[in-house]
Image: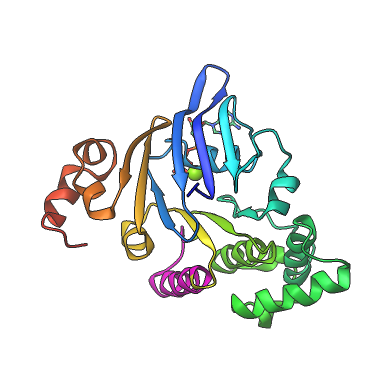
Amino acid sequence: MSALLELRAVSRRFGGLKAVDDVTLDIAAGEIIGLIGPNGAGKTTLINVVTSVHPASEGTVTFDGRDITALRPYQIARLGLARTFQIVQPFPKMTVLENVAAGALFAGRAASVADALSSAREHLDFTGLSAIAHKPAASLTLAQRKRLEMAKGLAMQPRLLMLDEVNAGLNASEIDEALAMIRRIAERGVTILIVEHLMRVVLSVSQRIVVLHHGQLIADGEPQAVLRDRAVIEAYLGSKYAALHAGGGT
Ligand SMILES: Nc1ncnc2c1ncn2[C@@H]1O[C@H](COP(=O)(O)OP(=O)(O)OP(=O)(O)O)[C@@H](O)[C@H]1O
Ligand SMILES: [Mg+2]
Protein backbone atom coordinates (compact mmCIF):
# COMPACT_ATOMS: atom_id res chain seq x y z
CA MET A 1 0.00 0.00 0.00
CA SER A 2 1.43 3.37 -0.93
CA ALA A 3 1.47 6.25 1.53
CA LEU A 4 -0.86 9.23 1.33
CA LEU A 5 2.10 11.65 1.35
CA GLU A 6 5.55 10.67 0.16
CA LEU A 7 8.66 12.82 0.32
CA ARG A 8 11.64 11.50 -1.60
CA ALA A 9 15.07 13.09 -1.02
CA VAL A 10 13.47 16.49 -0.59
CA SER A 11 15.67 19.54 -0.03
CA ARG A 12 14.95 23.24 0.10
CA ARG A 13 17.70 25.82 -0.15
CA PHE A 14 17.59 29.48 0.78
CA GLY A 15 20.80 30.82 -0.76
CA GLY A 16 23.60 28.83 0.86
CA LEU A 17 21.36 27.37 3.59
CA LYS A 18 19.75 23.96 3.22
CA ALA A 19 16.68 24.50 5.43
CA VAL A 20 15.39 21.03 4.51
CA ASP A 21 18.11 18.54 3.68
CA ASP A 22 17.45 15.29 1.84
CA VAL A 23 14.29 14.29 3.70
CA THR A 24 12.55 11.05 2.82
CA LEU A 25 9.29 10.47 4.67
CA ASP A 26 6.03 8.55 4.20
CA ILE A 27 2.78 9.42 5.91
CA ALA A 28 0.00 6.84 5.73
CA ALA A 29 -3.68 7.75 5.57
CA GLY A 30 -5.16 8.04 9.05
CA GLU A 31 -1.90 8.63 10.91
CA ILE A 32 -1.33 11.39 13.47
CA ILE A 33 2.34 12.33 13.25
CA GLY A 34 4.23 14.71 15.50
CA LEU A 35 7.04 16.71 13.85
CA ILE A 36 9.51 18.09 16.37
CA GLY A 37 12.96 19.66 16.44
CA PRO A 38 14.81 22.76 17.64
CA ASN A 39 14.06 26.29 16.44
CA GLY A 40 15.26 26.67 12.89
CA ALA A 41 15.31 22.90 12.28
CA GLY A 42 13.21 23.25 9.13
CA LYS A 43 9.78 22.16 10.37
CA THR A 44 7.84 25.09 8.91
CA THR A 45 9.94 24.93 5.75
CA LEU A 46 8.98 21.27 5.34
CA ILE A 47 5.30 22.26 5.45
CA ASN A 48 6.03 25.11 3.04
CA VAL A 49 7.69 22.67 0.65
CA VAL A 50 4.79 20.22 0.75
CA THR A 51 2.26 23.01 0.12
CA SER A 52 4.51 24.68 -2.52
CA VAL A 53 4.73 27.96 -0.61
CA HIS A 54 8.49 27.43 -0.97
CA PRO A 55 8.71 24.55 -3.48
CA ALA A 56 11.38 21.88 -3.16
CA SER A 57 14.80 22.66 -4.66
CA GLU A 58 15.43 18.93 -5.07
CA GLY A 59 13.43 15.77 -4.64
CA THR A 60 9.78 14.90 -5.14
CA VAL A 61 6.57 15.20 -3.14
CA THR A 62 3.75 12.81 -3.97
CA PHE A 63 0.23 13.07 -2.59
CA ASP A 64 -2.21 10.22 -3.10
CA GLY A 65 -0.04 8.83 -5.88
CA ARG A 66 0.26 12.13 -7.75
CA ASP A 67 3.47 14.15 -8.11
CA ILE A 68 2.63 17.55 -6.57
CA THR A 69 6.19 18.93 -6.41
CA ALA A 70 5.63 21.62 -9.03
CA LEU A 71 1.97 22.41 -8.41
CA ARG A 72 0.76 25.78 -7.13
CA PRO A 73 -0.49 26.12 -3.54
CA TYR A 74 -4.17 26.42 -4.54
CA GLN A 75 -3.89 23.29 -6.70
CA ILE A 76 -2.45 21.39 -3.77
CA ALA A 77 -5.25 22.67 -1.52
CA ARG A 78 -7.76 21.38 -4.03
CA LEU A 79 -6.27 17.92 -3.87
CA GLY A 80 -7.01 17.83 -0.15
CA LEU A 81 -3.88 19.08 1.56
CA ALA A 82 -4.33 21.92 4.05
CA ARG A 83 -2.08 23.65 6.57
CA THR A 84 -2.27 26.29 9.25
CA PHE A 85 0.26 29.11 9.46
CA GLN A 86 2.62 29.43 12.44
CA ILE A 87 2.44 33.20 12.05
CA VAL A 88 -1.32 33.54 11.86
CA GLN A 89 -2.30 35.74 8.97
CA PRO A 90 -6.06 36.21 8.67
CA PHE A 91 -7.48 38.90 6.39
CA PRO A 92 -7.72 41.47 9.21
CA LYS A 93 -10.70 43.50 8.03
CA MET A 94 -12.78 40.51 7.04
CA THR A 95 -14.96 38.87 9.67
CA VAL A 96 -14.14 35.50 11.18
CA LEU A 97 -16.91 33.95 9.08
CA GLU A 98 -15.58 35.51 5.86
CA ASN A 99 -12.03 34.34 6.61
CA VAL A 100 -13.20 30.76 6.98
CA ALA A 101 -15.34 31.03 3.83
CA ALA A 102 -12.21 32.23 2.00
CA GLY A 103 -10.53 28.96 3.00
CA ALA A 104 -13.38 26.96 1.46
CA LEU A 105 -13.18 29.00 -1.76
CA PHE A 106 -9.37 28.74 -1.99
CA ALA A 107 -9.59 24.96 -1.87
CA GLY A 108 -12.47 24.86 -4.36
CA ARG A 109 -14.81 23.40 -1.77
CA ALA A 110 -17.71 25.76 -2.48
CA ALA A 111 -19.70 26.39 -5.66
CA SER A 112 -20.63 29.93 -4.64
CA VAL A 113 -19.93 32.51 -1.95
CA ALA A 114 -23.24 31.62 -0.28
CA ASP A 115 -22.20 28.00 -0.27
CA ALA A 116 -18.81 28.92 1.23
CA LEU A 117 -20.46 30.99 3.97
CA SER A 118 -22.79 28.18 4.90
CA SER A 119 -19.98 25.65 5.11
CA ALA A 120 -17.93 28.20 7.08
CA ARG A 121 -20.71 28.39 9.70
CA GLU A 122 -20.41 24.64 10.28
CA HIS A 123 -16.68 24.91 10.84
CA LEU A 124 -17.12 27.85 13.21
CA ASP A 125 -19.53 25.72 15.17
CA PHE A 126 -17.04 22.84 15.28
CA THR A 127 -14.21 25.10 16.45
CA GLY A 128 -16.35 27.02 18.96
CA LEU A 129 -16.08 30.36 17.16
CA SER A 130 -19.75 30.90 16.28
CA ALA A 131 -20.26 33.59 18.91
CA ILE A 132 -17.62 35.79 17.28
CA ALA A 133 -18.46 34.97 13.66
CA HIS A 134 -19.08 38.60 12.76
CA LYS A 135 -16.10 40.17 14.49
CA PRO A 136 -13.26 41.41 12.29
CA ALA A 137 -10.35 38.96 12.47
CA ALA A 138 -8.02 41.75 13.63
CA SER A 139 -9.94 42.05 16.90
CA LEU A 140 -9.36 38.44 18.01
CA THR A 141 -7.16 37.21 20.84
CA LEU A 142 -4.20 34.97 19.96
CA ALA A 143 -6.12 31.85 21.09
CA GLN A 144 -9.06 32.83 18.88
CA ARG A 145 -6.75 33.46 15.91
CA LYS A 146 -5.20 30.02 16.33
CA ARG A 147 -8.71 28.59 16.39
CA LEU A 148 -9.55 30.58 13.27
CA GLU A 149 -6.52 29.04 11.51
CA MET A 150 -7.88 25.58 12.38
CA ALA A 151 -11.36 26.52 11.12
CA LYS A 152 -9.88 27.81 7.84
CA GLY A 153 -7.91 24.61 7.41
CA LEU A 154 -10.98 22.49 8.06
CA ALA A 155 -13.08 24.51 5.61
CA MET A 156 -10.65 23.28 2.96
CA GLN A 157 -12.00 19.78 3.73
CA PRO A 158 -8.53 18.29 3.73
CA ARG A 159 -7.51 14.66 3.74
CA LEU A 160 -4.22 15.72 5.29
CA LEU A 161 -4.05 18.68 7.68
CA MET A 162 -0.70 20.10 8.78
CA LEU A 163 -0.85 22.08 12.01
CA ASP A 164 2.09 24.44 12.63
CA GLU A 165 2.30 25.31 16.32
CA VAL A 166 -1.43 25.82 16.79
CA ASN A 167 -0.94 25.73 20.57
CA ALA A 168 1.92 28.22 20.94
CA GLY A 169 0.99 31.00 23.34
CA LEU A 170 -2.17 29.30 24.60
CA ASN A 171 -2.90 28.64 28.27
CA ALA A 172 -3.40 25.15 29.74
CA SER A 173 -7.18 25.02 29.35
CA GLU A 174 -7.03 26.43 25.81
CA ILE A 175 -4.48 23.72 24.97
CA ASP A 176 -6.78 21.01 26.35
CA GLU A 177 -9.59 22.33 24.18
CA ALA A 178 -7.32 22.38 21.13
CA LEU A 179 -6.23 18.80 21.84
CA ALA A 180 -9.83 17.63 22.04
CA MET A 181 -10.46 19.34 18.73
CA ILE A 182 -7.45 17.70 17.08
CA ARG A 183 -8.74 14.31 18.24
CA ARG A 184 -12.20 15.01 16.83
CA ILE A 185 -10.65 16.03 13.50
CA ALA A 186 -8.69 12.77 13.41
CA GLU A 187 -11.87 10.81 14.21
CA ARG A 188 -13.36 12.23 11.03
CA GLY A 189 -10.64 10.38 9.13
CA VAL A 190 -8.32 13.34 8.51
CA THR A 191 -4.60 12.51 8.54
CA ILE A 192 -2.71 14.97 10.76
CA LEU A 193 0.86 16.24 10.90
CA ILE A 194 1.37 18.37 13.98
CA VAL A 195 4.41 20.61 14.53
CA GLU A 196 4.66 21.35 18.21
CA HIS A 197 7.21 22.32 20.85
CA LEU A 198 5.08 21.27 23.82
CA MET A 199 6.00 17.63 24.40
CA ARG A 200 2.86 17.07 26.50
CA VAL A 201 0.81 17.92 23.44
CA VAL A 202 2.94 15.93 20.98
CA LEU A 203 2.88 12.83 23.15
CA SER A 204 -0.82 12.98 23.87
CA VAL A 205 -1.86 12.88 20.20
CA SER A 206 0.95 11.40 18.10
CA GLN A 207 1.13 7.77 17.06
CA ARG A 208 4.52 8.42 15.53
CA ILE A 209 7.12 11.15 15.90
CA VAL A 210 9.62 12.43 13.37
CA VAL A 211 12.51 14.70 14.33
CA LEU A 212 14.26 17.31 12.22
CA HIS A 213 17.65 18.81 13.09
CA HIS A 214 19.53 21.19 10.78
CA GLY A 215 17.02 20.23 8.07
CA GLN A 216 17.77 16.52 8.34
CA LEU A 217 15.45 13.79 9.56
CA ILE A 218 17.29 12.33 12.54
CA ALA A 219 14.57 10.04 13.93
CA ASP A 220 11.26 8.54 12.85
CA GLY A 221 9.33 6.07 14.94
CA GLU A 222 7.10 5.16 17.82
CA PRO A 223 7.00 8.02 20.40
CA GLN A 224 8.64 6.25 23.34
CA ALA A 225 11.48 4.99 21.14
CA VAL A 226 12.08 8.47 19.71
CA LEU A 227 12.18 9.93 23.25
CA ARG A 228 14.97 7.54 24.13
CA ASP A 229 16.95 8.11 20.94
CA ARG A 230 20.39 9.52 21.79
CA ALA A 231 20.58 11.82 18.75
CA VAL A 232 17.15 13.27 19.59
CA ILE A 233 18.10 13.82 23.23
CA GLU A 234 21.30 15.58 22.20
CA ALA A 235 19.70 17.69 19.48
CA TYR A 236 16.48 18.63 21.17
CA LEU A 237 15.15 17.08 24.33
CA GLY A 238 18.19 17.48 26.55
CA SER A 239 19.47 14.84 28.91
CA LYS A 240 17.47 16.33 31.80
CA TYR A 241 14.22 15.63 30.07
CA ALA A 242 15.34 12.14 29.15
CA ALA A 243 16.38 11.32 32.74
CA LEU A 244 13.07 12.59 34.01
CA HIS A 245 11.11 10.45 31.62
CA ALA A 246 13.25 7.34 31.53
CA GLY A 247 11.16 4.23 31.85
CA GLY A 248 8.45 5.21 29.43
CA GLY A 249 6.42 7.79 31.37
CA THR A 250 5.39 11.05 29.73
N1 LIG B 1 11.86 32.40 3.40
C1 LIG B 1 13.07 32.15 3.93
N2 LIG B 1 14.18 32.75 3.48
C2 LIG B 1 15.40 32.50 4.00
N3 LIG B 1 15.61 31.63 5.01
C3 LIG B 1 14.55 30.99 5.52
C4 LIG B 1 13.22 31.22 5.01
N4 LIG B 1 12.36 30.44 5.72
C5 LIG B 1 13.11 29.78 6.62
N5 LIG B 1 14.40 30.10 6.50
C6 LIG B 1 15.51 29.54 7.30
O1 LIG B 1 15.42 28.14 7.24
C7 LIG B 1 15.74 27.54 8.49
C8 LIG B 1 14.58 26.69 8.95
O2 LIG B 1 13.53 27.57 9.36
P1 LIG B 1 12.09 27.04 9.76
O3 LIG B 1 11.23 28.24 9.95
O4 LIG B 1 11.64 26.03 8.79
O5 LIG B 1 12.40 26.34 11.16
P2 LIG B 1 11.39 25.73 12.22
O6 LIG B 1 11.86 24.37 12.52
O7 LIG B 1 9.99 25.91 11.76
O8 LIG B 1 11.68 26.65 13.49
P3 LIG B 1 10.69 27.18 14.66
O9 LIG B 1 10.59 26.04 15.65
O10 LIG B 1 11.42 28.34 15.27
O11 LIG B 1 9.38 27.55 14.06
C9 LIG B 1 16.09 28.70 9.42
O12 LIG B 1 17.48 28.84 9.43
C10 LIG B 1 15.40 29.88 8.78
O13 LIG B 1 16.05 31.08 9.09
MG1 LIG C 1 8.36 26.89 12.47
Placement of 179 over or under 46, stated as above or below: below
Q: Quadrant of residue 108?
A: bottom right
Residue 169, x across and y down, in percent: 46, 60
Decide whether residue 207 is among the magenta residues.
no
| Residue located at (54% from left, 72% from top) | 188
Can residue 60 be seen at all in this image of the molecule? yes
Can residue 135 be seen at all in this image of the molecule? no
Out of 36 and 188, give the one closest to the viewer. 188
* Furthest residue in direction top, as rendered: 16
**The C terminus: image quadrant:** bottom left
Residue 207, x across and y down, in percent: 35, 59
Drawn side of residue 110 relative to residue 133, left or right: right
Residue 66, x across and y down, in percent: 64, 42
Drawn side of residue 221 relative to residue 18, left or right: left
| Residue located at (11% from left, 57% from top) | 247
| Chief SS of the magenta region | helix
The image's colouring method is rainbow
Q: Which residues are magenta?
A: 167-186
Decide whether residue 183 is among the magenta residues.
yes
Q: Quadrant of residue 211?
A: top left
Drawn side of residue 121 relative to residue 22, left or right: right
| Residue located at (33% from left, 65% from top) | 204
